[in-house]
Amino acid sequence: METRVKIYLLVLVLNYYNVVSQENGHKLFFSGYVKNLYEFSFADRLEQLNYDGLLNNRLNFKYNPSEEITMRIELRNRIFFGNNVKNFSGFRDIVSRDNGWADLSRNLINNEGILFNATIDRALINYTKGDWDITLGRQRVNWGMNVVWNPNDIFNTYNFMDFDYEERPGSDSFRAQYYLSDFDKLEVTVKKGSSKNDYILATMYKFNKWSYDVQLIAAINEEDWILGTGWAGNLKNAGFKGEISYFIPKENYNEFEDVLSASISVDYAFKNGLYINGSALYNTITDTNSGNFENLMYNMVTAKNLMPFDYSGFLQLSKEFSPIFSASMSAIYSPTNHSVILIPSFDYSLATDWALNFTGQSFFEFEDYKAIGTSLFIRLRWSF
């Protein structure tokens, strides 16, 4: 694995210095942010209050040696402190976990009170010319069309509960896109993971029909043959989106069942600035033993199992009250134990490039009339 990492980084560094040494006129871009996130959580009594902190720095480098070529390297530098670092035995492994072909995540400081992790989550070279768009390296391959649950996002599924990671995960992959027209394209993507049998080979055909963007997916991974479709369009003035993926076991077909994962969403923006979004998820496989309901933020989700319940619903109301203040209220519901997650969020712009956010996540099971846990987050962000 160490050899893979050295090769991976060496190729990127050599290419970087090669293009930097070219003639003047090429463009180098640098951006990023610093975020300070505090979490206060408790089960049913404030006396059980836990405290966690995260200092998060992101560095984005982009270089354009020509009109056709773009190179990107992006790093996450995170310093964790608080109860999770001290008391959660598996927390350090979760933070440093990297399932890519190259392990580009390192815990640089790992002691009893603090954890410093550095991760390269984007490292790619992109070539675009004419109708071709080709990308090699760690990248975000986003085939999802819905906002919350994406059964079509088979490469790097993201966890909706992890709201602080807006860039979302990436995959070590080769991606080739060929545009047949302004609205139609063919795409082939190959992803390689950390283990020998961790791979995905997939193709997608995307087209526009009846004012809808439609995609058809066929893929194969270590365990399954995958067929999928998705669409995005409008029902009069409301947005209407959906995704369906069907997983067929490659081996031991009689021992394992086919899995269907499907989501649908409708959203509408009112003239007064109010926005509403509703979504529903159904999957035929459930895994209630994958972790406690309140620990969904730390669970690894896949397109095959986006929630540990067979049925889930989502509703969000949001409104921009002024150019510097907005708020939203989201709720996730499952008929299993009548489980509910309430997620209020408030965003305030303090100044240019400075933003303040308050977010809550409260977990309930109304069948047993109990509150499972509540987390309150305060985040200050400076972008540059």
Image (tube, helix red, strand yellow):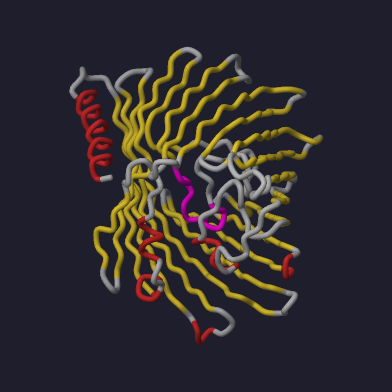
Which residue is painted at 42% across and 49% down in the image? 352
Q: Quadrant of the N terminus?
A: top left
Would residue 187 appear left or right of 256 to someone viewing this image? Answer: left
Which residue is painted at 56% across and 27% down in the image? 203
Is 345 in front, or is 85? Answer: 85
Q: Residue furthest right?
A: 236
Q: Give coordinates of residue 224: x percent, y percent.
A: 58, 40
- Quarter of the view holding residue 125: top left
Which residue is painted at 31% across and 29% down in the image? 63
Which residue is painted at 77% across and 23% down in the image? 210
> Overall secondary structure of the magenta stretch?
loop
Q: Give coordinates of residue 165: x percent, y percent.
A: 46, 52
Q: Quadrant of the C terminus?
A: top left
Q: Give coordinates of residue 320: x percent, y percent.
A: 63, 52
Residue 19 drawn in magenta: no
Q: Which residues are magenta?
A: 159-170
